[in-house]
Amino acid sequence: MIEAAIYGYGNIGSGVAEVIEKNQDRIEKAAGQGVHVKYVLDLREFEGDPVQEKLVHDVDVIVNDPEVKIICETMGGNEPAYTFTKKALMAGKSVCTSNKELVANHGAELIKIAEEHRCNYFFEASVGGGIPIIRTLNSALKQENILSISGIVNGTTNYILTKMEKDGAAFDEVLREAQEKGFAERNPEADVEGYDACRKIAILSSLMSGKTVDYKDIYTEGITKLTTTDFLYAEKMEMTVKLLAMSRQTQEGYLTMVTPMLIGPENPLCSVNGVFNAISVKGNMLGDSMYYGRGAGKLPTASAVVADVVEAARFMGTHLPIDWSEEKAVLAKMPLSRRRFFVRLDRNKVPEARAAAEFGNGRVVFLEQCPDEYGYITPVMSEGEFAEKFEKLDGAITRIRMEE
Amino acid sequence: MIEAAIYGYGNIGSGVAEVIEKNQDRIEKAAGQGVHVKYVLDLREFEGDPVQEKLVHDVDVIVNDPEVKIICETMGGNEPAYTFTKKALMAGKSVCTSNKELVANHGAELIKIAEEHRCNYFFEASVGGGIPIIRTLNSALKQENILSISGIVNGTTNYILTKMEKDGAAFDEVLREAQEKGFAERNPEADVEGYDACRKIAILSSLMSGKTVDYKDIYTEGITKLTTTDFLYAEKMEMTVKLLAMSRQTQEGYLTMVTPMLIGPENPLCSVNGVFNAISVKGNMLGDSMYYGRGAGKLPTASAVVADVVEAARFMGTHLPIDWSEEKAVLAKMPLSRRRFFVRLDRNKVPEARAAAEFGNGRVVFLEQCPDEYGYITPVMSEGEFAEKFEKLDGAITRIRMEE
């Protein structure tokens, strides 16, 4: 029996305890021995809950117990998770985490510490919840030169966008409903502004490049400006709008961004609806593959943590290398990246001939419901060139990027 | 540098050589050292091809060379692949195969031989081509109790069905076109009768159960009886028809089958078109996840073989356990399984009231184009009960199973 501890008994942490208990027979078979939760670290008391007998408030009780071999870090946030994780790794205990914030900030460093202490820092649950994307990149696709990754990695925003598309509802209204249903946080900024997706694509891009892609360097745009009218145009074009997190190898480096994007039905991400996540990976030999599942939620995320626990148990005493160094990856400059743009223009201020003169020959899209404006699909052009023209054009209402 | 050999220099075998050459830098990084192809086994001569210098006709040259540590078996078929694989494993060489026939027939036995000789028998490429589904089941989802697997695992039939759906073309016509394009074999039986899908779901079901699911015990129905009219009905119902390979835990054992099935747009398999494959997995904690990619083709399949080569190289000298014993899994009896059925009935022989009396209260579907018949969706009933009624009903034209 391997002794484990859980840092943080919130939604995910209690899920980890539940998965370990309910699927003990599977875990024992897979890991070669059972896994037992000896301690749960939390500042709260949980009176009357059976977890009380395992509860400790002092991390050193866990770190100093040589019996404990594996830690599940489900606290979230940078501190004290960072300090507590380092302590554990330095004591030779493997850490399995769902904490995307910490992984995005200190992934390479923590992997290095794990290597030095012959243990592992695993983070399957930090991206895509129940989708085993980290393991796929670290193991199943290691022979591939990964050319691009693009995905829907935030369930809250995908739920909101799906509702806006299907029900024609406004952003604020759907957000409120999502908050009532528990699909969105009371402070929804991290989700709707794209910050959560940004951390996740930083992690995936780091694994793709083998170097560190700093999330602070990633162009990030959320979904708060999208309107029901945008979705009417999307429908007219037989497309939809998804919040995509993307990273692509280019000659100038990795082009990485989070942005709402118009995609068509031939893109498998187009039909990923509701709280589901999906991540599409293009390899130089493999071509396209996609991984789909529940991107969040207590049990799917906890299951991913436990998958790492099984791996840590199987390879106890061995450090399994993860190709992610502290060196910074070279990122391509956003203004140089090229694509089509969908712009909405005021018909009275910008006649169609003017749009063609400004942006080059494109396609006009009319919407019966909005006779005073029209949509225009530009030819492929650089972000920089487009932005310059769009910003100074009186009568330009809004713009959405289009997939190439 | 690790020395390897390839058994069979056909489409996949030459692809393996290509992937190893082109992605050598990735392989070296992932495996800790480079991989070099020392021998290629084939009866043919390949005059003028650079492969000639590695070509051997006698398997014993490879088996008796202690330098060779890894074999890529891409011959296909049972013999001589079975004998040659056993020889290699018994000599302590890991074997990475794309041979679904051999894996379905002798998987458990070959894994056992590998264990006894501290090497590995890996078969990622045997199911789903470039989709890393075997590794996902064997590692990433090992903590899960897998409740069901269902997938589109044959690209040829999915290409044909997609064409029938989108173009309203007849089966024979699309098959001929697929043969001309190289998407279907000259003898298409293994694909269109579902035999290929049957081997693949046998392998997946064995990994799901930890025991052997014999492909000969799996109910298998192909797509040759499907018509353009069936697709008109499907369209009317806002559904489509896919050839699904399925396995599900039930109280009576594993219910495993290959059959065309009507599925709706809320099923993520519904939008998997053309030669793409996708496999949906339901775990007791994880819920639904899906894995999508190129199910066949030279390079995607070869890439999956090379993924196994990297794994074998990383863990050289260690047997990585795969939970698949020779003991036979208990299978549920097909006649007891329950679902809805879609039946087409001759309007003159079976009035609608009669359909309700025969099958119970269901839903009638009319098709303008076919005034002499109608479709009927039965309530949920057992296969056995349905078959008895359907077979003796004069005026019953055809039936398609519907997903629950």
Image (cartoon, coloured by chain):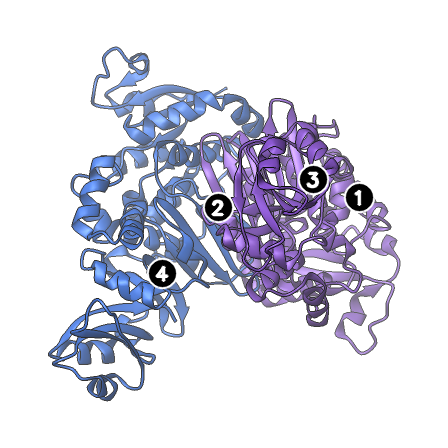
Chain colours: A blue, B purple
Front position among marks 3 and 4: 3
Disc tally is: 4
Residue type beneath disc 3: Ala
**Secondary-structure class at tag 4:** strand
Front position among marks 3 and 1: 3
First in residue order: circle 3 vs circle 2: 3
Query: Residue A89: where, in percent of width, then height?
Result: 37, 35
Residue contact between numbered discs 3 and 1, judged by CB atoms under 8 Å:
no
- Mark 2 falls within which chain? B
Marks 2 and 4 sit apart, C-alpha to C-alpha, by: 25 Å
State the residue position of label 2. B267
Residue type beneath disc 2: Asn
Query: Residue A322: where, in percent of width, then height?
Result: 45, 48
State the residue position of label 3. B202
- Mark 1 falls within which chain? B
- Mark 3 falls within which chain? B
Q: Is residue A262 left or right of residue B306?
A: left
Query: Residue B67: where, in percent of width, then height?
Result: 75, 53
Label 3 CA crowd tier, 10 Å (few <14, some 14–19, many 20+)? many
Marks 3 and 4 sit apart, C-alpha to C-alpha, by: 36 Å
State the residue position of label 1. B91
State the residue position of label 4. A246
Marks 1 and 2 sit apart, C-alpha to C-alpha, by: 46 Å
Query: Residue B231: where, in percent of width, then height?
Result: 59, 56
- Which of A327/A225 is in front? A225
Q: Is residue B326 left or right of residue B307?
A: right
Residue located at (60% from left, 68% from top): B22
- Which of B75/B212 is in front? B212
Q: Is residue A153 above or below residue B329?
A: below
Label 2 CA crowd tier, 10 Å (few <14, some 14–19, many 20+)? few
